[in-house]
Image: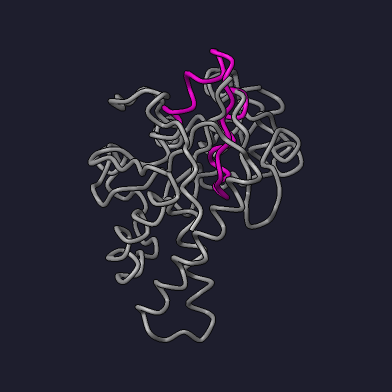
């Protein structure tokens, strides 16, 4: 049985770089060097803990993907990556390669969709996948068998986490975010529906599809969601991860061979 370890690379690197920039290191080259060293140390720890047979680091590209085309306001206002870090990504990818880890960067697709595509065929074939990320959006993939490890908080983002955090099943998360929106992505939900109301609606109706087709004449919040039907469906499309992107390689191409000790 294969065990694929997936690094949500920029999720890892940007948090490490942010921590370095707070260490009174003013020189951008020194910040990058410190980020590189800390990243390598973190990845070595992750590799030791996960003991994978296969591994890959997935990066976002600078090219706008299909979400931006569909919804031009997507991620509008998000803090840009520091320029020095952006220019240093090749160096960081080289460091990962020296550790035996290839990097995947698409010219047209977001890392999140690439990761969903990597995960999809594994579990039905008896394989295992572990994702290193703090991004809760990946919890929608938990029913596929994916394990999600939050390296920084030393916790698993699993079914119990979803229940504790949202009071929902992983299969309901896309519909939940379709109602509430996701501020970090500038995806709008339904005005006047927050997390608690969205939980209540999904507890009552089960899914967004059921909610939008129900007789809501006696439920003001359900009626409100129906009035914003198009916004809900757009948010649902944007939030749901695509898992059918042609990758051009097979699992065997990602076999992990530890780098020689130096």
Q: Nearer the viewer, residue 140 or 10?
A: 10
What is the magenta range? Answer: 116-144
Residue 165 x %, y %: 71, 44
Q: Does 179 sit above or below residue 81?
A: above
Residue 253 x %, y %: 37, 28
Choose top left, top right, bottom left or bottom right for residue 30: bottom left
Q: Nearer the viewer, residue 151 or 92?
A: 92
Question: In this rendering, does residue 229 appear at all?
Answer: no
Residue 223 x %, y %: 56, 31
Q: Does 127 sit above or below residue 233?
A: above
Q: Is residue 105 left or right of residue 209?
A: left
What residue lies at 47% left-to-right and 38% top-to-bottom? 257
Going by the picture, which residue comes out furthest to the top? 125
What residue lies at 70% left-to-right and 33% top-to-bottom? 168
Residue 90 x %, y %: 29, 58
Quadrant housing the N terminus? top right
């Amino acid at each position: 049985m294969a065990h694929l370890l997936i690094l949500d690379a920029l999720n890892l690197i940007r948090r490490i770089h942010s921590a370095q920039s707070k260490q009174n290191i003013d020189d951008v080259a020194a910040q990058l060097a410190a980020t590189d060293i800390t990243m390598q140390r973190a990845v070595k720890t992750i590799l030791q803990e996960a003991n994978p047979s296969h591994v890959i680091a997935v990066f976002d590209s600078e090219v706008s993907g299909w979400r931006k085309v569909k919804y031009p306001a997507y991620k509008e206002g998000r803090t840009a990556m520091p320029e020095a870090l952006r220019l240093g990504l090749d160096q960081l990818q080289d460091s990962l390669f020296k550790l035996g880890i290839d990097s995947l960067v698409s010219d047209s697709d977001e890392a999140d969709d690439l990761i969903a595509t990597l995960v999809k065929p594994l579990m039905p074939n008896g394989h295992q996948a572990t994702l290193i990320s703090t991004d809760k959006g990946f919890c929608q993939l938990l029913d596929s068998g994916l394990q999600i490890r939050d390296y920084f908080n030393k916790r698993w983002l699993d079914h119990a986490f979803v229940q504790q955090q949202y009071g929902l099943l992983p299969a309901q998360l896309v519909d939940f975010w379709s109602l509430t929106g996701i501020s970090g992505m500038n995806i709008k939900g339904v005005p006047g529906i927050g997390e608690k109301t969205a939980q209540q609606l999904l507890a009552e109706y089960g899914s967004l599809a059921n909610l939008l087709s129900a007789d809501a004449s006696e439920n003001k919040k359900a009626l409100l969601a129906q009035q914003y039907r198009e916004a809900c469906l757009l948010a649902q499309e944007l939030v749901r991860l695509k898992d059918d992107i042609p990758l051009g390689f097979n699992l065997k191409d990602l076999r992990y061979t530890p780098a020689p000790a130096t």
